[in-house]
Amino acid sequence: MSRTGHLRNLFSTTYGTAPTLAVRAPGRVNLIGEHTDYNDGFCLPMAIERDVRVAIRPRTDKTVRVVSLEQHGVVTFELSAAIPKATDKAQHWADYVKGCAQILVESGESLVGADLALTGDVPLGSGLSSSAALEVAIIHALLTAAGRSLPGAQIARLGQRAENKYVGTNCGILDQLSSACGVLGSVMLMDCRTLELTPAPLPAGVSVVIADTGKRRGLVDSAYNERRAGCEAGAKALGVSHLRDASLHGLWDAERKGTLSPLARQRCEHVVAENGRTIAAFACLTAGDAVALGQLMDQSHNDLRDKFAVTCAELDDLVTIARALPGCLGSRMTGAGFGGCTVSLVRDESVQAFVAALVPAYRAKHNLPIVVDVTRPAAGAGALNLA
Ligand code: GLA
């Protein structure tokens, strides 16, 4: 049975009636432009074929009930009740759902209650934005139940706010905007200052291969928030609002003058260089130059490892193995880091052999369940056909 079929069944067995509407929101993979979004910089993501699906039946009261195919229990709450902020330790899946509902209520949306059933196949904590997919899907679902809709960028901002406020990660806009506004068949240059998205197709003859190290690290208890604070302090020391407006020269100057510590300079240097690499990578896309794009991806990983320090042995080893395989043009970590996935650009004719060689070579080093996906750019969030 299809995933949507299982979702329909779950809805009917839980609520004793059929859903009337459905929506979906995808995960994302970022080709380059990592830890740049909260610095008002640039990213180059695409939505992926894995997603969160929600079946909906609007109610006439203010009660929301949610059930998930992958998690236990039915969660019930009232749209009118204030929802307490989730603590760092209590990250229940329903915190995301309640947080999204609360953000919508706070933003003045008049919602109706709804019975919801959801299913997702974006692996949790893998750097493919499972939480953003859930947030964007839930916001779409609650708006849809009330017969409302909002532009994608606004939905993304609401999802980000829910994550910042109710789940505890001080994330940027990359994940939610990719999920809300993905373009079928295209990678998008994302300007995180203006939220402008410029799509471009992948160069002909290459595939995007995502490999999950199997190493999990929650964002909340990771060094993510600390890295972000470091970037903000760096921008302040340089007298700019965000590192987007800083130059490498300015960073070195500040270090010489003693306003930036050597470590802070190194961290900020990654961000400034990564913004440049991301713009260059987009130019490679439009020129169809997959080889140069791959080289930029390699450089990105090296800086994330050596200067920004957000990789780990599993990510570094997987990248090293991938780069040595025939047909691999570039390989890097994707997402926040500290575990999760790598993304590699691989020539089409080599993809099968690449996957076949990558898995055992990684397993020989790390006893973790590596999962490999060859993926194409998928459409952003929207209605889902229940049939
Ligand atoms: C996580 C965050 C994003 C972004 C990336 C790193 O995915 O949610 O906002 O900062 O890490 O690029």
Image (cartoon, helix red, strand yellow):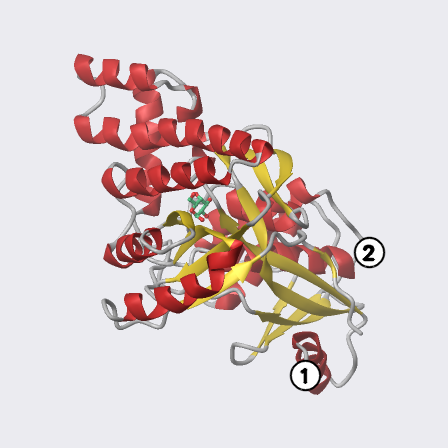
Depth check: give the residue in front, 100 or 287: 287
Q: Residue at x 32, y 53 (%)?
A: 319
Mark 2 and mark 1 lie on one chain; the one further toward the N terminus is 1
Image location of residue 176, percent across then percent down: 56, 48
- Disc 2 packing (10 Å; few <14; some 14–19; many ≥20): few
Image location of residue 7, percent across then percent down: 67, 77
Q: Quadrant of ligand 1?
A: top left
Q: CA distance from mark 2 to mark 1?
A: 30 Å
Q: Is residue 14 above or below residue 335?
A: below
Residue 386 in sight: yes
Which secondary structure, mark 2? loop
Write down the residue under mark 1.
1
- Where's the N terminus, which quadrant? bottom right
User: Residue 268 is drawn in which quadrant?
Assistant: top left
User: Residue 77 is drawn in which quadrant?
Assistant: bottom right
Q: Amino acid at mark 1?
A: Met
Q: Is residue 116 above or below residue 32?
A: below
Depth check: give the residue in front, 377 or 338: 377
Residue 35 in sight: no
Q: Residue at x 35, y 63 (%)?
A: 213
Depth check: give the residue in front, 293 or 72: 293
Image location of residue 105, percent across then percent down: 66, 51
User: Residue 73 is drawn in which quadrant?
Assistant: bottom right
Write down the residue under mark 2.
147
- Where's the C terminus, which quadrant? bottom right
